Image (cartoon, grey):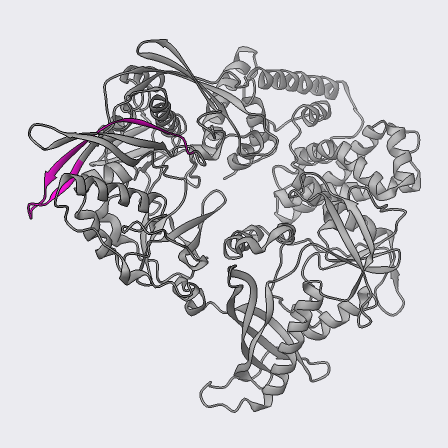
Amino acid sequence: MKKRNDIFDDIDDETVEKLSNEFPVLTDEEKDRIFAMSERKYNLATEPIIESEGDVKGVERYSRPTWHRFAGIAAAIAIIAGGAGGGAAFMNSMKKSAPDKLAASEEEKVVPTETTEQTTEDVSEFAEAARALTDRYANYQNDIAQGGLETDYSSMLKFKLDPDYGGIEESVWYKVTDERYPDMASLRLEFESLFGPVDPPEFLFGGEFTSAELPEDQILPSEISNLKYMTYDGQLYVNAFGYFGNFSEWSDDNIEIEKKSDNEFTAIRNAKTNDVIDPENDICRETRYVFDIIRNTRNGGWLIDSVSEMDDDSFNNADSQAPDYTTKNNVAHFNSAASAEDLIESHLTFYDTWLYGTKMPDKSEIEYNQGDFLTFNLMRDEVLVAYYRKLSDYNSLEELKENIEALYTDSAFEEIYGVDVNDFDKYDLSSHSSGAFISEEEYGAVIEYNGFVYLRADNLNPLFKILKRVDDDQLSSDESLRTIQAYIINNTFPDSSWAESGETTFEYTKDSSGNLVLNHITAPSSDEQTQRVFLAKNYEGYKNLERLGNYGTFKTDPTAATIPSDDDNAPYAVCTEFENTAELRNYLEAYVTPEYLDEHFPDMFEGEYPTFKDIDGKLYGKLFDSQTEIYWGETASPKDPEEDMTITNISDDEVMVEFICHSNIEDTEPTRQRMYAKISGNGFTTPWKVTIFDYPDAKG
Amino acid sequence: MTDSELRAYMKDAPQLGRRALFDEYCNYVYAIVTNKLRSCGSREDIEECVSDAFADIYRTLDKGSSRDEDLKSYIGVIAKRRAIDAYRRLASSSGRSVSIDDEDNFHEIASDTDIQKKAEISDRNSILINKVKELGEPDSTIIIQQYYYNRTASEIAKAISMTASAVQKRSVRARSKLKELLLEAGVSL
């Protein structure tokens, strides 16, 4: 929501100039967009336009371009679905919007005058038109939209690209030598004969340029490098990169036709796409194209009014994308452990399966197919791709739960994996197609999809400690505790694989049937690497404290009403991350000292308008931006625990850790963050507590 | 790039020259247009107007009619004219009344009262900008982008590598701090 401006209501020219110099605001993207608009207007206004009957007018005929805000969404889906098949061409196409739906302009659209019931209607009168148009559509897609025309590869133009342009440094263009399409007008003609006189997809057909105004080896502006075709020194050229659409070929000759009226019908045809779903076997995603076809009022022929892919679960079902992957019934499941050794062994295997998905419970390696992954889109500040991995060895959520209950108590499972077993049933996403948008409430850690179990595979909830191996162990006298030497891997920072040995204590209990289950695991620190692992965990905990306490950003229930705050500031909203202030405080005090919390976040729980408070038994927090959910990992953070963490021992029980934090925003220098921590007892989470945290490189 | 270099570039390589001119002055023109349209236009209206202004600028430079003028002031005048045109259009379409002050704010100074008024505004603005700068970065940028350019917290966050909610929180604090600083300096918001 825009703030009502009252600070800058009366700004004089001198101050405007000062502001523009000292606080420039335009991003490169905005500059490119506005420049492109100004160019279009300039070109239109400098060339006289023949309106009709010989009138020559110097008027601007310019329509405001549509902003393709969601162009990135399809791209995000496609990059997952397409696997490694995208490459440079895909990167290039991500820069564009690639509209597949083409709407006829109002004045040209045929208004159907009569409608008929779709039952046993005779549709043979449309069959010929349907075949001809869909066949021509295939040619248009392959030849024109995706640049498959005959070209002379030796007549090539090469321009430089802005280095920030998606990592591609050169823009390469080939001269079109296809006799069918000698110039841009012939391409447009073919387009219009298929779709009518509608606007072609943006950037498909470009303008005319000369070598004088656009010399080779110079940087090509993005509004030109985004084009598929341009005329250069009078010759038609096609861009070597970028394509519009992912159509490959018709799968068969069948066409389903549905009559809408004498002047309108729908044709559905099975197609193969360019989205590789199984690279090894060269299998591409199949789909169905739905054409709305209308009568061309000018000549009595037919035109394609719109084209879309059918939203059909049978084509998006992950199961149908997983060829020959039927290991479900050959899996050794976890049974109740007969001994403590069995239990620890099973725990380690389950841990591995859960976190990495590399091994089956029977220790055989798991091989994945493209179809074992599901993606959904989640609208946050930007579109987030929710990525799920199939747990192929479980036939249902119930079966997964049975396996978990054979190994862990519910509290132990939640402690180790950060997931509540009792929440599993809440997430059945079978009603969504892969790639569809899901809501925040549906974004569960474990979901069911068409009878399969999927585990969320992302970095939003980094799981910290991974026990890889038991080297040695000894029983306690009452046989309810066991201390082992274990191999620990830190998973806090992505892509790290360093490890250490440390002592881990397993605590058992017996379930209602008298079987042994794990109840609690404790891993105190020992050497330098363990220290590093735990301090990394402190960093994560501290960042959550900043997120919650400093910025008031938390997961909330968007359907629950907010409560206005009397201080005329942000309202209170339900915080769904913790049950109440006590639980939140406990969580935070696992990472920072209570003194630190009170001193640096005095208004977190105290004062007239605390950031968090309990209202009617629920935890509420001040919601500074109700539309934004931000995670600390989205901004600067350390990436490599070896490179990016320097630990200095200050005393026996105090350390100073310097983190080198890398921003995921391009061209941003790494910055330092510094944390002091003291040993303060042992715990599964971390034995350290933060006493000071600062930002030596912060501006201002 | 100096004015004469830009002019020469535009002559030798028109499109690249236009881009160079645009890059040099786009923030200036954008600031002028924003100042005028912030209260009645959308972001798209502002971008439209900036692009109109540049199309005008290219055309008049093509004609060579401004050969001897200082490019920046020349561009400033065109941008203001375009902004005022757009303001009138937007204000009339939204039923907003257009005050004489709004229309005339680049006319010649007419009287002693005007001179005094303008001097007061200029002083106030100078204090305002100094106090905004006193907030220190990133708060100065946050305040300018949020209140002058009407940018959202998410957009600002992206520009200065922070989280949107951090921007929001800092903005609330920076604004009350600015209020205090201005009060101390005798300026009230």
Quadrant of the image containing the C terminus of chain B: top right
Residue A688: give x, y in percent of width and height: 30, 19
Residue B176: give x, y in percent of width and height: 48, 21
Which residue is depicted at the point 87% across and 70% down? A53
Residue A199 visible = no
Observer-nearest residue: A597 or A634? Answer: A634
Observer-nearest residue: A5 or A486? Answer: A486
Q: Is residue B4 left or right of residue A583?
A: right
Q: Residue furthest front?
A: A472
Q: Residue furthest top?
A: A651
Residue A689: give x, y in percent of width and height: 31, 19
Observer-nearest residue: B109 or A329? Answer: A329
Which residue is depicted at the point 31% across and 51% down? A360
| Range drawn in magenta | A497-519
How many callouts does the rendering have?
A: 0
Q: Is residue A588 left or right of residue A483?
A: right
Dividing the picture into quadrants, the one containing residue A481 is: top left
Observer-nearest residue: A308 or A521? Answer: A521
Dividing the picture into quadrants, the one containing residue B75 is: top right
Please say whether residue A503 is one of the residues in the magenta stretch. Answer: yes
Q: Is residue A620 left or right of residue A672?
A: left
